[in-house]
Structures are given as C-alpha cells and as structure tokens.
Image: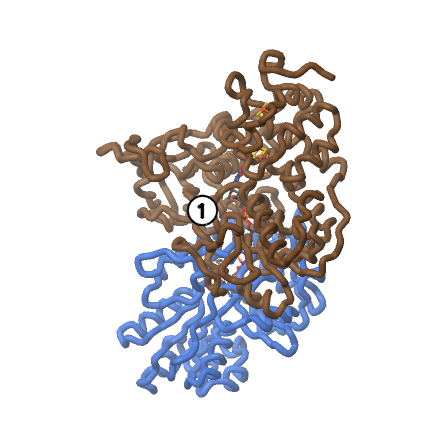
Amino acid sequence: MAKRKTIRTIPRERAEVGEQDPQARIRNFDEVTLRFTPEQARHEADRCIECPRPACTPGCPVGVDVKGFIMKLSAGDLRGAYEVITETNLLPAVCGRVCPQENQCEGACVVGNQFAPVAIGRLERFVGDTAIANGWSSIPYIEPSGFRIGIVGSGPAGMACAADMAKAGCDVTVYEAFHVPGGVLRYGIPDFRLPNTVIDAEIANLEKLGVKFECNTLVGRLFTIEQMIEEMGFHAVFIGTGAGYPSFLGIPGDNLNGVLSANELLTRCNMMKAKDGGFDTPLPIGARVAVIGAGNTAMDAMRVCRRLGAEQVHCIYRRSRAEAPARVEEVHHAEQEGIDFHWLTAPVEILDDGKGGVRGMRCIRMELGEPDASGRRRPVVVKGSEYEFDCDLVVVAIGTNANPIIGQTSKIKLDKRGYIATDDDLATSLAGVYAGGDIVTGAATVIQAMGAGRKAARGMKRYLGLRDTETVY
Amino acid sequence: MPSHPDHRGFEIVAREDFSDVTYLLEVHHPQMAKAARAGQFVIVMLHEHGERIPLTIADFDRQKGTITLVIQAVGKTTREMQQVCRVGTHLLALTGPMGEPSHIGGQRHVVCVGGGLGVAPIFPQARAYKESGATVVAVVGFRSKDLVFWEDKFRACCDEVIVCTDDGSAGLKGNVTTGLRQALDADPEIDEVVAIGPPVMMKACAEVTRPRNIKTVVSLNPIMVDGTGMCGGCRVKIGTGIKFACVDGPDFDAHQVDFDDLMVRLKRFSETEKAALARWEEGCRLGTAQPAGK
Ligand SMILES: Cc1cc2nc3c(=O)[nH]c(=O)nc-3n(C[C@H](O)[C@H](O)[C@H](O)COP(=O)(O)OP(=O)(O)OC[C@H]3O[C@@H](n4cnc5c(N)ncnc54)[C@H](O)[C@@H]3O)c2cc1C
Ligand SMILES: Cc1cc2nc3c(=O)[nH]c(=O)nc-3n(C[C@H](O)[C@H](O)[C@H](O)COP(=O)(O)OP(=O)(O)OC[C@H]3O[C@@H](n4cnc5c(N)ncnc54)[C@H](O)[C@@H]3O)c2cc1C
Ligand code: SF4
Ligand code: SF4
Ligand code: FES
C-alpha cells in the first residue's frame, strides 16, 4: 500500500490549469478555463490527504463524496470516480465549472489551512468532461413503477428531480416554456463558462433514462398545475420554475432605451444566439457599458459585453470587492479582461440623451457602516460625492423576484415574497405537488437547485410509496 | 432539440390573405385551442435563426383544435412568414396562451375598438363580451375599403359594427376615434371601452374616454423576448409603477398607461430592424434569402 499522504508530503502548489489569454478571449466565446490534462488531474488528486473525516463533503450542499472520487482518480479509475460523484451529483461537468467552490467544498478543505485547497471543482469537471467525451452515463436497471411524474421547468432543479424519478421507474415528462431545455444553464450562463455542448450532453443523458422533454409549454397557461393532477393523469408534480423576474433600479431613467436587465442581454446573446451572426434577434451593443451589480449574473453580462466589442465596461457595486457575491474566479477573470470596477458606488440617475437613449449615469460613493440583517456591512451614502460619467448602455443585474405565473394560475400557497411555500420535504400546499430550486429559495446556486430537486424526489417517492432507490445510481 | 411530439413544429392548416400586408394563419394546437381565452397571445419562432415574436390569438376553434393568428407584415420576421408560411408548413415554436385573459363579465354596454393590426385581436374580446351578455358595438378602422376584413365575423357577434376608413371609401371617413365618439354619443350607458391597435391610436382612444370617465382597457404590445416575465424587456409604465406586459398584462387601464414611454421603447431596435429587413430583401432579390443565414 502506498504511504499515507500528509500535509507535508503533498505538492504545495495547485496544478496549474490552462487559461485562454485575456487578450485573445475577449474576442471569442470559447471557454476561458481549460480542462485539466490527465497529468494535471493526477497532480491535483495527489494533493488530497484523504482525511479520515473529510471536511469537504459537509461543505458541499449535496454532500459529494469528494475523498471517494479523488481516491478513484488517484487509482486511475476514472469511471469509478464518475460513479462516486454521480451518486450525489447528477451534473459534475456543470457543477465543476459553476459552483462557488470557495464557499463550499474547497472552502472547507483542510489543505486550505496551509496552502491553496484541493481544486475539487476542477477535478470534478475533469471527471464530468471525461464522462461526456466517452459517452458514459449511469443507467441502472429500471423497473417500471407505473407512476407518471410531471416536472415544470427544465433547469437544474427540474433535471435532478426528473433523473431520480426516472430511476425509480416513473414515466417522467419535463415541460419547459422556452423552445430549448436547460433553464439558466442555457439562457443565462454564457458559453465561455459553460458550453452548450455540456448542457446538450446532460439533457441527452436524461433522455437515455427515458425522460421526455416537452418544450414550448407554458405551464399554468396551457394547462394548470391542478389540471396536471386532476385531468392529465400525473401522480405527482414538481415545480422548478426558477426566479427569473428581474428587478430594476427604481431611479430616474430606468425605462430609457439602453437600460436592460442582464437576463435580457444574456438571453438574446446565449439562447437566441444574437452573438453568432445570421440570427434575427437584435442585441444592443454599447461602446461604453455600465453594469449594476456584482453577482455571477453581473460578471457574465460584463464579460459578454466585452466580447461583443464594448470599449469600456464599468461595474457599479454599492459594497466592496469582499462582499461581491460572484464566484471569486469570475471576479478575477473579469478583472483580467479589463472591466473597470467602481466598488462602493451606487447609481442615482440614468441620464437621458434626449432621444430616449442613455448618455451617462450619475453615481454616488458609499462607505461601509454597521452590519445589516445579512451580516454584511451596510453601505451608506457619502454626502456630496455624486459624480457623472458617460455610458450608452446600462445593464441591470441587481437580482430577481419570483416568477408570478404559477401563482396567478393555481391555488398553490405562496410565501410573503411570492415564492412557493413548502414544508421540509419540499411538499407544497397541493397534495402530490412538490417545488424546489430558485422558485422556493429565491436566486441561489445550481448545486442548491439540484439538491432541492433530489430532495423533492425523495419526498415524492415516499408520497407514492416507492422504495428509495437513490443508491442505485 | 427534443421537444413536442411533432419534431417539425406546429403545422399551419389554413392561410388567407386579406391584403398584400395582412394575412391569416390557422395553426394546429388542440391543447392551446382548449386553453385560449380572449386577450391572450402567443410567441412564435419561425425557424432556428428566427426571433421570438408575440402575436395575439385572434381566434380559436376548440372543435378543430386550431388557433388563428392575423399578422401584418411590418418587418423582417413578419414578411418572411408571409413568404414562407404555407398550408402544410410548420412553425418551429409556438408557446402560449400567454398573458392574463381579459376580465370579461359584469359589463353591460361595451365598445370594442380595433385599428390596424388591432382589428383581429379585438375580435375574441368582442365575442367574449357578447357571450357574457353585454351589448357590444365594434368600431374597426382600416386605411381603405380593399383592406377591410372580418366585417362579417364582427357582424355575427356584435350588436352594431362601425367601419371607419381613412379615405372614406367604406363606412365612416376618419380614424377609429370618430367611430368611437359616435358610439359613445349614441349610447350613454357605455360602461367599458376596449381599444387595441397602434399605440397612437390607443392613446387617442384613451383621451376620448378620459373626460367622459369611462373605464377603458388597452392591450399593450411592447417588444418581447420570452413572454414569461424573465427578461423585463416588455416593461411598461402604468401609473407610477413599472409592469411587465407579458405577465402582468397585456391588458391595462388606458388612463394609467404612459403611451409616450411605450412609443419610445418600441423604437429600441429600429436601426437593427431596418438593417435586418434590408439584408433580407437583398437576399430575396438575389435568390439567396435562406432563413439559415450562416
Ligand atoms: C446569469 C447567471 C449566472 C449564474 N451563475 C451561477 C454560477 O456560476 N454558479 C451557480 O451555482 N449558480 C449560478 N447562477 C444561479 C443558478 O443558475 C440558479 O440558481 C439555478 O439555475 C436555479 O435553478 P432552477 O432549476 O431553480 O431554475 P432555472 O435554472 O431558472 O430554470 C427554470 C426553468 O423553468 C422554466 N419555466 C419557468 N416558468 C415556467 C412555466 N410556467 N412553465 C414551464 N416552464 C417554466 C424556465 O424557462 C427555465 O427554463 C447564475 C444565474 C444566472 C441568471
Ligand atoms: C402582445 C402582443 C400582441 C401582438 N399581436 C400582434 C398581432 O396579432 N398581429 C400582428 O401583426 N402583430 C402583433 N404584434 C406585433 C408583432 O409582434 C410585431 O409586429 C412583430 O414582432 C414585428 O416583427 P418583425 O421582425 O416583422 O418586424 P421588426 O423589424 O421587428 O419591426 C418592424 C416595425 O414594427 C414595429 N414593431 C416591432 N415590434 C413591435 C411590437 N411588439 N408591437 C408593435 N410594433 C412593433 C417596429 O417599431 C418597427 O417599426 C403584437 C405584439 C405584442 C407585444
Ligand atoms: S458539487 Fe459543487 S460544492 Fe459539491 S463537491 Fe462538487 S464542486 Fe464542490
Ligand atoms: S478536506 Fe480536502 S484533503 Fe481532506 S478529503 Fe476533502 S479534499 Fe481531501
Ligand atoms: S417578454 Fe420578457 S419579461 Fe415580458
């Protein structure tokens, strides 16, 4: 047996991962971070000291057996590593790329106490990509249970719930309002962070499990949740419709042409492919763009504008860099790509060019005061610090609210903020109807949405009296 | 892409041309025909390279399982559809019914005003008001006599139909506000007016009814992408607040609507739209106008 690894014997430095040069990548939508080579993956796997009680696993919202999959990797058993991850995480190629690992698995990894933590996300992506390249999918023997399950929304929450219910032998149909499935993974997150081919591969895996996708279907309006149960023969329903109802600023100039939500920009660019040429959907491109917010959505919007040819891209955020909710890697990449960050700055007014468009913005400086309810220090206005600067496009990325359609069309109980109310099992007020993901929690993360989809599946299985076959994955 | 049962899309089962700019498409979608109600719309995508465009459900036939769209060819997409949508061809995507259905019921005397591309969308409302027991006057406006369509359909479900033409070649001479005034003067008991058409027209109708204090509903048509509340592109100013027309509307209280804002927002992409149309027309001339523009 190999000698036990300790913090003193492992490589101190992380395997260096390839990245597209910033000057080159601001002219394309190809992926920024390259995949580990097998040697790099091996090096990084060697950095895990295989803790007896791993801290990483509880750090992961779905509890991926990180140590388990890394040990398989070290042993050269990639297929085995894939099987270990997919016991808990359906979409390793996605989560490896987009999880905020620094707050989750990697944030908890003990190696991080002395060196950079094990690059768990990149290893996970390496395994996920290898699986896609080789066409692996873990399809267990499925015994039909006779139950029919309807899933509303094809984002990560819906995908995860669909997979678990299909594996439990149910006949699963996923309804999606758009003409293509994938949710935010498709319309929101750009190709340079998560290529469409990855999403296509994951959808294809679900189809191999027997899951049917019906796009162009706006549930609530074409048929209601109640009709699914009462008339359409579904034994249980899962709602994973996301939280895409964008907020605007509520300041003068909000409605000018040239002010748009990050969702609109990203949808036009990513899903409607306006960036590719030969597609009809128009895409507003500014020479000087101001993006409000500093979450993942804001970073994506800024980097998309950069790639579409904007000369200057400004980020306006009322707190400081330390409070920015985006993944650290994205902030870092955005900085490399020449985004101009205005930390501790809030917009006051968007200035009219006299023709309905935008000519600039008036901002005010902020400083950090006492911590607020979220525990973050509350930004307060610095009196007399207002200033103006020129811009011709303003992209608003300050968050989203609950989508109202299901609430408008069903008797389902909502909470005070308009999100769907659920119990601990993610059961809603309607019998047999479960909900999870952003439509329950408000905007969160891909892995949390997936975890919610799986949790709801467990609840549904109990409701239907099905044995929990989760371990078969 | 994996999607609906028929991978080619949604079949066009009938087509009628009302003029060289207005045409009707009847599309097979039994589930939608069953669900559709007056005031709702769909989003259509012609092909993979196309835009998603909103169109009102101008009629639906629950027996035949079809919905009807009446379209004015104004730009690239609507002209391309005019050229390629034949009976037996398919629309790639058709989603709906979208939007809150019109609140119909309880009104006793109603005037339904449709102008330009609003004539067809006002029809299901007129019919629904009639079915709810109201007395219904329809005022429909066209540029000239040869552009008039569906007069018989309106006559079949309304108590009175007032046709207006800009040049006076049929019915009243003048725009729909002339007809609206006439209808209001004739019946002091009118308790609701519904107006659909270009924003200028809806604004003019709102100004006719405002001094008379008659509740007026308009169906707004801002530029849309998803139609599900996700992008905020369709936001409109209503009173002091902002609403998303696709999920909060498209019907709003006309006296609260900021029409000037709507008109400015509709010009958002005018440069790109002009360029797209010019490119496409050039392609048609050269015989290379392939939808897949790559
Ligand atoms: C631009 C952007 C970048 C992000 N980056 C990251 C990141 O780097 N890392 C991370 O962890 N998280 C990120 N997030 C957050 C993450 O994507 C979401 O938390 C997650 O996708 C939520 O999943 P969901 O399944 O709940 O909903 P969604 O992904 O929103 O999917 C919901 C789906 O339901 C469909 N739908 C809605 N209503 C209906 C209806 N009535 N009928 C039928 N279908 C309907 C929608 O069209 C959509 O496809 C990002 C979000 C955005 C917007
Ligand atoms: C809820 C709703 C219902 C609608 N119902 C119908 C209908 O039943 N029949 C119909 O013919 N049209 C309808 N429209 C308008 C239709 O969507 C637009 O005409 C279409 O998107 C134009 O696309 P295009 O590519 O052909 O033209 P573009 O090149 O996009 O535009 C050409 C011209 O049309 C104007 N235009 C663009 N978008 C709109 C719009 N949303 N509304 C009004 N004018 C616009 C532009 O200002 C421009 O001058 C509706 C719009 C909405 C929002
Ligand atoms: S799913 Fe995300 S949080 Fe969990 S181990 Fe993988 S990368 Fe880390
Ligand atoms: S905490 Fe870090 S070192 Fe320990 S098992 Fe997890 S990944 Fe390996
Ligand atoms: S069309 Fe996107 S929110 Fe209404």
Residue A147, placed above or below residue B148: above
Residue name at image x 61 percent, y 24 percent: A52
Residue A293, placed above or below residue B130: above
Residue occupying the point 64% across, 79% down: B63
Res A272 visible: no
The residue type indicated by label 1 comes to Ser
Q: Residues within 10 Å of mark 1 (few under 14, many from 20)?
A: many
Mark 1 element type: strand
What scheme was used to colour the molecule? by chain
Q: What x and y, as percent, mark residue A418?
A: 42, 55
Rendering coords of residue A164 (x, y %): 65, 49
Query: Is A160 on the left or on the right of B39, as rendered?
Result: right
Mark 1 C-beta to ligand 5 under 8 Å: no
Q: Is residue A291 visible?
A: yes
Q: Camera-side residue: A33 or A418? A: A418
Q: Quadrant of residue B30?
A: bottom right
Residue annotated with mark 1: A261
Q: Chain of mark 1?
A: A
Query: Looking at this rendering, what residue extends furthest in the left direction?
Result: A384
As drawn, the chain in brown is A
Q: Residue at x 74, y 49 (%)?
A: A208
| Chain B image colour | blue
Q: How far from the left and from the top, in percent, is residue A444?
A: 49, 42
Report the quarter where the N terminus of chain A lies.
top right
Does B285 sit above or below residue A372?
below
Q: Quadrant of ligand 4?
A: top right
Viewer-side residue, A26 vs B203: A26
Q: Which residue appears at 60% of the width and 77% of the height? A: B61
User: In the image, residue B218 lies at what x, y percent?
Assistant: 40, 69
Where, quadrant-wise, is the C terminus of chain A in this rendering? top right
Placement of A28 over or under A403, stated as above or below: above
